[in-house]
Amino acid sequence: MIRFLILRLLAAVPTLFVISVVVFCLQLLLPGDAALVIGGGEATQETIERIREETGYNDPYVVQYARWIGAALQGDFGVSYRTRDAIGPMLLQKIPVTLHLALAALVLSLAIGIPAGIVAAVWRGRGWDIAVTVTALAGISMPNFWLGIMLILLFAVNLGWLPASGYVSPFVDPVASLKSILMPAIVLGLPLAAAMMRHTRSAMLSVLQQDYIRTARAKGLIEGVVIRKHALRNALVPIITLATLQFGNLMAGAVLTEQIFSVPGLGKMIVDAVFNREYAVVQAVTLLSGFTFVLLSLLADVLYYWANPKLRSRSL
């Protein structure tokens, strides 16, 4: 297990380096001048040149990258040009919000997708299978922004059951937090639930055709026991991998959803930063998202190793 982790960590290092280089280079391609943003629209050319010299924008790109990544590795992502606040503490305030939203969406997708996929596999080719498959296709095809607006119109405007926007921490008021996070979680979780259903159905169909399933049935085991203890346990290996990687998509894909529901997370933060030309904030959030994907990919490899006995036996 230790050797497996070391190999995966070593493989992740060049990936993280490439991500940091790409993030830094993309910032150079953005329109506008960061020095002009810092100095303001009425700044003179002399003032802009002085700002560029003080901030190091006149240095070679290699020097700028080394200085930026060195500070980032220490948790220093610079300061916001507009508010003059440090970006690191801002990220620490936004991460729990997006993490809460992503976890809620993931739990919702697992609660819907796995049972639906099992039903579709067990009743393959019948009415339940067709109904679940059609519903999954509709869930995948449904645009997030349209679903979010429809949910707001129904549950917030017409029924008044849920707040249309905003966010409440579960540590402040659990009930109000559940109400504020429910609609955004549905918008993020339904497409993932559809993908999870199709993945679970495919994995279950493959497992149900194996010899040990026929042996279990020949021994007279109850069908529910065969499905739960023999088929589902072996089908969970690819499902775990998908869920772990999709959690990264939820963290990074909450941009539009957070904007619709005014959830003050990383997604809304990066949208506001783009509109205000806060390049340092965009860099920090993008770099954090890339690192999150790599770490989740590493976690998926570990979980796959733990859940798959064949991999463990090869390492012995």
Image (cartoon, grey):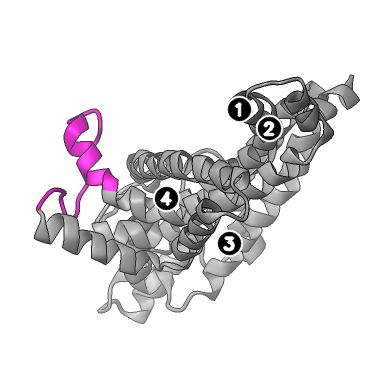
Q: Is 177 in the magenta?
A: yes
**Given the image, on which type of amino acid does mark 4 rest?**
Gly
Marks 1/4: CA–CA distance: 24 Å
Q: Secondary structure at mark 1?
A: helix
Task: Give residue 5's quadrant in the image.
Answer: top right
Q: Which secondary structure dominates the residues rendered in magenta?
A: loop
Range drawn in magenta: 160-182
Location of residue 218 in the rendering, given as x and y in whole percent from the top left corner: 77, 25
Q: CA distance from mark 3 to mark 2?
A: 47 Å
Left or right of 177 in this view: 146: right
Residue 274 image position (x, y, % from top left): 38, 68
**Closer to the camera: disc 2 or disc 4?**
2
Ranked by sequence position, the earlier of labels 4 and 3 is 3
* Sequence-earlier tag: 3 or 1: 3
Q: Secondary structure at mark 3?
A: helix
Q: Mark 3 is on which residue type? A: Phe
Give the mark toward the camera: 3 or 1: 1
* Residue 231, numbered label: 2
Which residue in the protein does label 3 denote?
Answer: 24
Alpha carbon distance from label 2 to label 4: 25 Å
- The amino acid pointed to by label 2 is Ala
Assess whether mark 2 and mark 3 are in contact (beta carbons under 8 angstroms). Answer: no
Q: Which residue is mark 4?
A: 189
Crowding at label 4, few (<14), some or many (≥20) Cα neighbours within 10 Å?
A: many
User: Mark 1 highlights which residue?
Assistant: 228
| Cα distance between the residues tagged 3 and 1 | 48 Å
The disc, 2 or 4, on the residue closer to the chain's N-terminal end is 4
Residues at marks 4 and 3, CA–CA distance in whole angstroms: 31 Å
